[in-house]
Image (cartoon, helix red, strand yellow):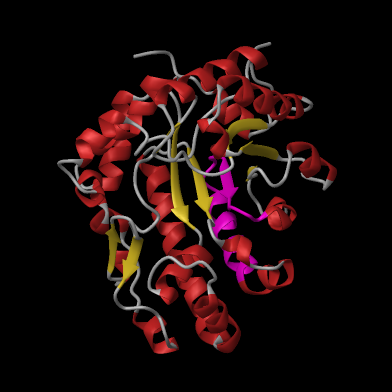
Amino acid sequence: MKPFNDTFLRAARGEKVSHTPVWYMRQAGRSQPEYRAIKEKYSLFEITHQPELCAYVTRLPVENYNVDAAVLYKDIMTPLPAIGVDVEIKSGIGPVIDNPIRTVQDVEKLGMIEPENDIPYVLDTIKLLTKEQLSVPLIGFGGAPFTLASYMIEGGPSKNYHKTKAFMYQEPKAWFKLMDKLAEMTIRYTKAQIKAGAGTIQIFDSWVGTMNVEDYRTYIKPAMEKIFTALRTEGVPLIMHGVGAAHLAKEWHDLPLDVVGLDWRLSIEEAREKGLTKTVQGNLDPSLLLCDWSIIEAKVKPILDQGLKQPGHIFNLGHGVFPEVKPDTLKRLTSFVHEYTAK
């Protein structure tokens, strides 16, 4: 096994590093031919329930692209069945929930996750990877309460989150009870991942960009404070990420976490000017990965230059890798970031 590469962890803590570390959201998945071959035989549910297979999918991009961290292959919906949510990942649609939340009674019916009993396959995958297979840190993750709640209230993916927001405004008692319950679930779920060996936790609030700052502070931030305060004692770097949420970056920076994820709508330079002093992660627009290399390189250089102005930059995309991206592009991009930023 190779010597352990802790560049990602050191950058997350704002320490000086020999090069800017790289990983890609959704690096394990549909853009890889090996993964597509596996998906012809197994569903996402079946892959995540087989630790050996799930570990293979998780470590594959580390071996193929030479990235500085692995991210556990699973979905943010993984813990929801344990609390009583009937969720199915439907091809071409996404998560579909047959028992959407409509009342405070629906919220009160939700149970609580016991990770060792409810998701042992996730923990076994983590142990396998971190004890035997990886020479880079493993990123564990969980969905943030707002994003999870949006699926639970809408019944599936949404473009506008009308039902979610209406429920939040109309039923504040039920809303805060739901936020608290989902925060507690996320704490238990991610603490179990850390105990099993995950070296970092990223919280995805994928759809929270739909909220304005004032409502975020009132309806969502208390649950995020609860999550990160509870995880702070675990001693691993904590990352926050959302999409279309540049207006919330300062709110995230104020939370007890280590790394603020940026999408392509907010440059590193602008983030620093807004007062973000913590490590930042991002933020290439993933659409650029379909372009010629000369265009990719021209867009990547300014991101790296801005990131090098002070310690604390992890190179990533502003959102996840999508199926049409060629693996060779990611491999070349990783090498370029490493070489361009090498000291």
Closer to the camera, 117 or 280?
280
Closer to the camera, 135 or 301?
301
In the displayed image of the protein, which residue is found farthest to the right? 273
In the displayed image of the protein, which residue is found farthest to the front? 292
Total marks shown come to 0
Residue 317 at x, y = what percent? 56, 37
Q: Is residue 194 above or below residue 332?
A: below
Which quadrant holds the N terminus? top left
Is residue 70 found left or right of 127 in the rendered image?
Answer: right
Q: Is residue 201 above or below residue 334?
A: below
Residue drawn where x is 40% and y is 25% of the image: 327
Residue 336 at x, y = what percent? 58, 16
Is residue 324 found left or right of 230 in the rendered image?
Answer: left
Q: Is residue 272 above or below residue 66?
A: below
Is residue 16 found left or right of 130 in the rendered image?
Answer: right
Tell me, yes or no, if residue 337 can be seen here.
yes
Closer to the camera, 290 or 158?
290
The part of the image, by quadrant, that contains residue 98 is bottom left
Residue 237 at x, y = what percent? 57, 40
Is residue 115 found left or right of 342 in the rendered image?
Answer: left
Tell me, yes or no, if residue 130 can be seen here.
no
Residue 308 at x, y = what percent? 74, 24
Residue drawn where x is 44% and y is 87% of the image: 104
Which quadrant holds the C terminus? top right
The part of the image, by quadrant, that contains residue 168 is bottom right
Q: Is residue 221 magenta?
A: yes
- Extent of the magenta region: 220-245
Residue drawn where x is 31% and y is 78% of the image: 99
Closer to the camera, 295 or 104?
295
Q: Is residue 213 magenta?
A: no
